[in-house]
Image (cartoon, coloured by chain):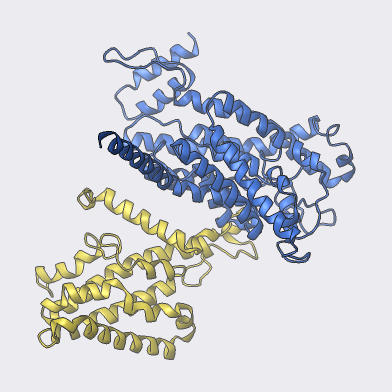
Chain colours: A blue, B yellow
Amino acid sequence: MGLKQNLHKLKEKYKGTKMAPAFNALHTFLYTPNDTTHSGAHVRAADDLKRTMNTVILALIPCLIFGIFNAGYQHYAAIDATLRLDPLGNFFTWDNFILGAWTVLPLVIVSYAVGLGVEFIFAIIKKHEVEEGYLVTGMLVPLIVPIDIPLWMLAVAVIFGVIIGKEVFGGTGMNILNPALTIRAFLFFAYPTWMSGDKVWVHGAKAMTGQPDAISGETILGTLAANSHPVYSIWDMFWGFIPGSVGETSTFLIIIGGLFLIFTKIGSWRIMLSAVVGALVMGLIFNGVVDQGWIQDGSKFYGLMSEPFWHHLIIGSAAFAIVYMATDPVTASQTNKGKWIYGFLIGFMGIMIRVFNPAYPEGFMLSILLLNVFAPTIDHYVVQGNIKKRMKRLKVKTA
Amino acid sequence: MGLLSKKDSKLILDPLADNNPITIQVLGICSALAITAQLKASIVMAVSVMVVLAVGNVVISLLRNVIPGKIRIIAQLIIVAALVIIVDQVLKAFAYSLSKQLSVFIGLIITNCIIMGRFEAFALANKPWRSFLDGIGNAAGYGLILIIVGFFRELLGSGTLLGFKVLGDPIAKTGLYAFGYENNGFMLLSPMALIVIGIIIWVQRSRNKELIEEH
């Protein structure tokens, strides 16, 4: 008997019992159900919620694999700086992969085990089917945290994010805030020493603090906020050979993932494009301020403000946030016009927060959470505007 | 309770749970968010509010036939203000550091919705003894939530209770800290107080479904 039969038997065995949702979820996650609806008109489509989620996960896999190599690479390069002279040659090595897998995979496992555990418990208590919402969140979470975050902290944050960010609102599809970002925001405010500074982005840096061979790795945003110049070339930043959260460093792979999401019509190109435009506009404004001489070298905003505007898209998590976080269909605006406004404001405010408050090393986390809250309001006014326009048209016609 | 009639004991017990000023009536939230980062401050706040509310209720009740309806809010305000100033001065005299820590929030008891609410809703229409019990009951319900929130916020946020290092020393790495445990800084921020209160409301309503509002 194959796995499918076994799962099916298990499902039948637990039918009607308390544990039924758990086995149903396992079964439908791997296979299409054996039975179909018998009555009524219904649409059969392959792109159900699970398929949608799996597509996003596929788009994230390159970032994860790159993140694994990068975790190892950053560690070894921090010890031996000569590795940085030839990043490409020293990047895809077994050493990097083994160290990276050793540090990144536990994050993935904890994220999924804890998050799905909470989902299963809630499904059983509330007697509904297990919702698929956590599949993507579970993959996003390890990609947006610093490499050395203690696993218990991650577990606490995941429990908090899934319960407070999602379940209290009614589960998948009802949440106001993006759960993955809720988890990250929780970590950031609860354990700031593990989420910012120059000791958390490279594996081992925090543990080795104070030793003679201590290593550190400041992110580019951190370096710029301190008004000094990053040591990485713009190509390093684009390919992603830089310290940062696990999966967000490689702008190149994120662009590939973003194109994949647009091509499969899973992610909204309107949000991505308008967010990019928003970020560029804000960057241009800051560049303009610097060009006008309104702000001098030595001012605490100078470093970030004078950075050429388009650099902002490849440093920090801007690209990752725009492609994978802002496009979350549940928390984004639903109307097309709303998506333009929503995306634009995310980019605009993301850069604004990044520059004006370097204490919050990534503005995009906060700008997306903020716009998540405003998305229903934006939709409301777009819909009302449309109703008004049509009423006017109706009046002209009937008059 | 042999001491109190059934009707009277209801005055005290009701606000503790099923008619709690914070979790059911959602009054007095501001101070519950502001001063609950530490258990000690929560307790002092709870006691202060209890004194003000119980004494204020009695005074209002005694004067209820004298106060003209048109200016009753001003009259109530003067009474609360007088009582709050007394409490503030007592704290300054006997617990100076604590009064520094509670800073403006003792003064802001004047604006605590629970107090004006009880004056208006109860003391103006009831006899002094019942008003006194009502004041004690509502202040206890308020204080109970404050103390629960303060307990969790101090325990998880600072790892202490009433200043005692119950989870070990974070710097010397003893107790739980030896295993890599760290304090949750988020607990010390006001948003977390709101979330803790939200969780209390959630637990309370899921235990007693009758409390769930229909809308």
Q: Nearer the viewer, residue B160 or A123?
A: A123
On the image, the x and y values in percent for residue A376 come to 41, 45
Q: Residue at x 41, y 77 (%)?
A: B105
Q: Residue at x 43, y 61 (%)?
A: B193
Q: Residue at x 70, y 37 (%)?
A: A251
Q: Is residue B33 left or right of residue A231?
A: left
Q: Is residue B83 left or right of residue A148?
A: left
**Can residue A294 be seen in the rendering of this structure?**
yes
Quadrant for the N terminus of chain B, please. Answer: bottom left
Q: Nearer the viewer, residue A396 or A347?
A: A396
Q: Is residue A339 above or below residue B7?
A: above
Outermost residue, front side = A399
Q: Is residue B193 above or below residue A173?
A: below
Q: Is residue A314 above or below residue A38?
A: below
On the image, the x and y values in percent for residue A146 come to 66, 46
Q: Nearer the viewer, residue A333 or A239?
A: A333
Q: How many dots with numbers?
A: 0
On the image, the x and y values in percent for residue B100 come to 48, 82
